[in-house]
Image (tube, grey):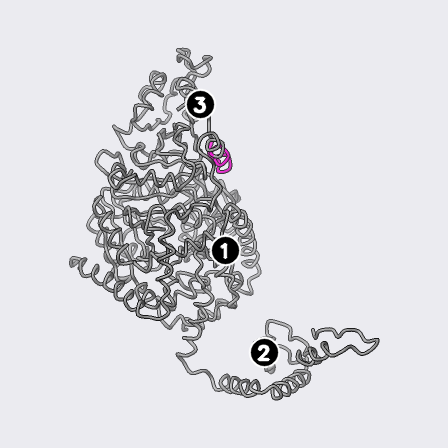
Amino acid sequence: MNAARQFRHAARAAAQDAEIAGILRFNIATYDAAVALGRGRFLDWREARRRAEAIKRDAIAQLDRYLEEFERRIIARGAAVHWAPDAAAAREIILEIARRHNVRRVVKSKSMVSEEIHLREALEQAGMATLETDLGEYIVQLRNEPPYHIVTPAMHLRREHIAGLFHQKLGTPADETSPEALVRAARREMRQRFVAADLGITGANFLIADHGLVAITENEGNARLCASLPPVQVVLTGIEKLLPRLADLALFWPLLATAGTGQPITCYNSLLGGPRRGGEPDGPRELHIVLLDNGRSRVLADAAQRELLHCIRCGACLNACPVFQTIGGHAYATTYPGPIGAALTPLLRGPAYDHLAYATSLCGACAEACPVGIEIHHQLLRDRAQAAAARRRPWSERLEIRALAWAAAKPRRFERAGRLARRLLRLRPQAIDGTRLDPLRPWTRYRQAPEPPPQSFRAWWRQRNSPPAPNSMAAEPPS
Amino acid sequence: MTSPIPESRNREAVLGAVRQALRHAASNPAERDAPAQASRSALEFPARGLFSIPAPGEAGVQRFLEECAANRTEVIQIGSEEQASAVLIKILESVMGLEPNPAAIPGAGPAGNTAVVAAGSEGLYVQDAPALRRLLSPLLENLSGRILWSSATACEENRAAGLTLAEALVAQTGSVIVGSDCGGRAASVLPELHIVYARASQIAPDLETALASLGGASANESLFDRASMASVVTGPSRTADIEKLLVLGAHGPRRLIVLLCMNA
């Protein structure tokens, strides 16, 4: 089955799942309330977005310079910087580091880029036990499924699901469903793995050019443990994560936290300058930074698309999107779901994902939610135009469009066509509503067909604006 | 056998692709970067005017206390070093299973405030700094053998608490900034309890000021020339991955206590 058909099937199934719908509604409502409060802490949220956009635009417009500056400064403190043109190269670089150190056990913190290159699978195939240590990621790893959401990986699960999973995998009591006890059990289990790990892998939220720093944002402390306990650390990240200056974090840390969870600032914001220094009691002896391209420079080459590289992976557009709210995260079958994923995936992974340009209502809620002001719906519309131009539409659709163009070309024609259409709609027998005989089936399958109005809008408008006849009421608009 | 990675070729491939993409995009009429660069230069202080920031001094302390209350950092205001020692032993009694010790500690008040370490309890991991040596000196007898100094060993899994200084505090967010020179990287994240001994004069009004002080006035005054890592810590470790419910102590400390010395 190709990706487009698979998507349609998965989306349909998810949209009809009432339990998932309830869970998503609850999660997103909780998120919305927190974000509304969080935005209130900014004196001017729109100005914050404008500045963030300007800073990212500058960072991306001079990406080569900032990358080299970052590299030079962090190498000066003893880190190694590796460049990976694609996913295979990144995997090979990391496997090579792991083999050199005879790594058997890996602990990982949350990184969407590692999902993008299927790093965990590669490490496990090479015989290295690899543990996701972010609680949400740990839960979906135990369930053997990809993250559901880029910030909240286990968003689709209720505590009973997690309690059942932990009972089965960790031996917690079957009736133990309190979040405190479940978190406790996971912490205990993972602590042993942290202590025994030979390699820690983290992502990066930002790379700071002027000081040569890796900035990592988290709430749990697992990324800090990944950077503290194992003797070797790898940071895997995309080349677009650059910020020009350390000072920019005074804006981007609160911005990311507010858009991501509604927090004023995330619990832990860490800055890595290099491996352990002489005299320090702990920290990795080696720090490797892997900078991944994997299609990003292609996006960069198109001035109209490159603002997609401004994305800071906060997840706000997913929560705001009516399509995501209906079909959830797994139906997309992409590393990055939701509006930003729908816009980015066809560019990173090619025309097999063109159908995602249709996974949008083009309502613009994503752009409104985006803290760095990416006009995601415009990007999706552009992707859609490209997808449409790339292949021949079915004859029926071409005929329809041609007929519509002909009818709309002259006002008289348009009016007559409308009258004809209203009459035809009224002739449609109720009995075929939503069945395969119904020519309106794509619409009526899931919705009630509207009653055709008694008159056209234009007729109603003329009537409304003509001088009222004595004793007559103003005309009601057609419903 | 594995062949060596053609690292330099990879570097040129990625950087070359980026440069070519930038040239390509620059020749496109849709290019909108020129005005953006102009507005960027105006953003010397990206966060300025976006947040309500307390004035330095008293207001900063007040705001720090409020933000800490909101993010679940426990702040104990301290008047003198003796008082700090007394408060510290109280805390350690409860978390390390200390038992009352009749050999009273000077200035520690009634005998109930003093303690010895019970057999089998876990140790206290402490950043080796003069201020913390002074703070602990009245307790050395009681804690003998139970204090692990960062100069001697790394913080390990079974420590009851980590005691460190801070690089700076941030009023705007109620944050504590710890560097890896504050007893290493693990001292402030591995134990269930992290205790910070700090002075009110260390409170920076906002993130902008705090970040500037980390970066240093000039390139060679940066914190990162003496510490390999720093973390802005805002409350105890937490997660909301299960039904969006807040649980403290996810992977890091379940409690974060700041002993805040009011007279600088």
Please say whether residue B234 is one of the residues in the magenta stretch.
Answer: no
Q: Chain of mark 2?
A: A
Question: Which quarter of the picture shows residue B231?
Answer: top left
User: Above or below — where is A291 with respect to A73?
Assistant: below
**Observer-nearest residue: B256 or B101?**
B256
Secondary structure beneath disc 3?
strand
For label 2, the residue is A441
Percent across and percent down for residue A138 are 40, 49
Q: Residue furthest right?
A: A471
Distance from the alpha carbon under mark 3 to that under mark 2? 74 Å
Residue A23 visible to an observer of this rendering: yes
Residue underneath mark 3: B78
Local crowd size for mark 3, using a 10 Å CA cut-off: few (<14), some (14–19), many (≥20):
many
Quick check: is B70 in the magenta stretch? yes
Q: Which residue is under mark 1? A: A156
Q: Is the magenta region chiefly helix, strand or loop?
A: helix
Question: Could you tell me which residue is drawn at 33 percent across and 28 percent down?
Answer: B125
